Image (cartoon, rainbow, N blue to C red):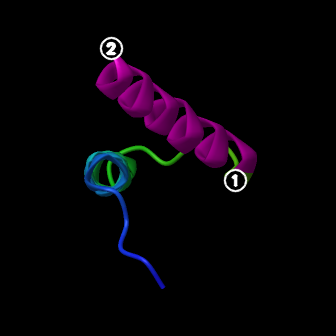
Amino acid sequence: MTPLDDDLVQHAKVVAHTVRDTLSEWCACLPVSDEAAVEELFAYAALDVAARQQ
């Protein structure tokens, strides 16, 4: 097994932080459905990754 590329590790950390923040926000206001929750998480993750690629 080879170690992960540093850039990939950084992406994973940023996305994990965003997921934690989003879950904390959901304590106050839950998403309307499981599908909405998944879509929200994917959207935030995509934004994080896109921002790091610029």
Query: Where is residue 40 drawn, in percent x and y?
Result: 55, 36
Residue pictured at 70% horizontal, 47% vertical:
33
Residue 34, disc: 1
Residue nearest the viewer, comparing 23 with 5: 5
> Residue 26 — which label?
none
Image quarter where the C terminus lies is top left
Using a 10 Å C-alpha cutoff, classify the residue at mark 1 as few (fewer than 14 neighbours), some (14 to 19) or many (20 or more): few
Upstream in the sequence, badge 1 or badge 2?
1
Hey, what amino acid is under mark 1? Asp
Judge whether residue 46 can be spotted in this image: yes
In magenta stretch: residue 52: yes
Judging by the rendered image, the residue that carries numbered circle 2 is 54
User: On the picture, is 34 further left or further right than 12?
Assistant: right
How far across and how far down the image is residue 50, in percent?
43, 22
Q: Nearer the viewer, mark 1 or mark 2?
A: 2
Question: Residue visible at 45% across and 33% down?
Answer: 44
Residue extending farthest to the front is 2
Q: Secondary structure at mark 1?
A: helix
- Dot 2 lies on which element? loop
